[in-house]
Image (cartoon, rainbow, N blue to C red):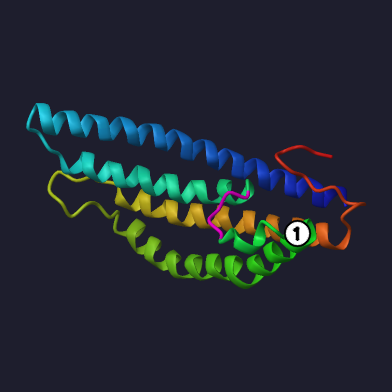
Amino acid sequence: MQSIRRVLFIIDKVSSLSGKISAIACLLLVVVIFIDVVARYFFNFSSASLFEMEWHFFSIIFLFGASYTLKNDKHVRVDIFYDKMSSKGKNWVNLIGSILFLIPFCWIILKGAIPYIEVSWKMKETSTDPGGLPFRYITKGFILIGFVLLFIQALGVTTKSFLRIVSPTSFKVIDNNNME
């Protein structure tokens, strides 16, 4: 049981790190947008690379933030029924939802994205826009990283939900990076 706790703890730590990366990308996105707006409105200057950098940072925010959001149970959900459920009912929803929807979705995306990313890396894909960013293949690589992180966190959520259902009192699950 201690090894399961340790694995869940590590999964949560990795997701916390991905959340920090997402937060840094948010800050960088704000800076890039600020520079873009100032350049455009005060200096009548526009750059394809600045515009592309904005959506590259946005993709990092989304891809790295997804596992962190799932870890903290802040993902989008229709809470009409969920909020009124018991703890055990919520764990059943999380378990079934993860097994039927989240894990297969991550698997499908990963399976489809790998060849797409491989081609991009092999050809060292760059922007097709004049003045665009040269390393588009790196950004496409974040698709793989982001969905691997989400897949791993989904396995953690599934495991926690299962353990809370089968043994709510004897197995206190790791929450918020605390070992109990």
Q: Residue at x 75, y 63 (%)?
A: 89
Sort mark 1 into few (<14), some (14-19) or many (20+) by Cα contacts within 10 Å: many
Q: Residue at x 64, y 65 (%)?
A: 98
Q: In the visual, does 139 lie left or right of 165?
A: left
Q: Residue at x 36, y 45 (%)?
A: 58
Mark 1 — residue? 161
Q: Position of residue 110 (x, y in %)?
A: 50, 65
Specify the quadrant of the image occupied by residue 99: bottom right
Q: Disc 1 on helix, strand or loop?
A: helix
| Residue 102 in the image: above or below residue 3 | below
| Residue 120 in the image: above or below residue 51 | below
Q: Position of residue 24 (x, y in %)?
A: 45, 33
The residue furthest right is 170
Q: Is residue 85 magenta?
A: no
Q: Position of residue 77 (x, y in %)?
A: 56, 59
| Residue 118 in the image: above or below residue 14 | below
Q: Residue at x 64, y 67 (%)?
A: 97
Q: In the visual, does 35 lie left or right of 153?
A: left
What amino acid type should be assigned to the residue bearing mark 1? Ser
Of residue 139 and residue 36, the one placed in the foreground of this image is 36
Q: Which residues are magenta?
A: 73-77
Q: In the visual, does 93 lie left or right of 128?
A: right
Q: Position of residue 101 (x, y in %)?
A: 58, 70
| Residue 167 in the image: above or below residue 179 | below
Secondary structure mostly taken by the magenta-highlighted segment of the chain: loop
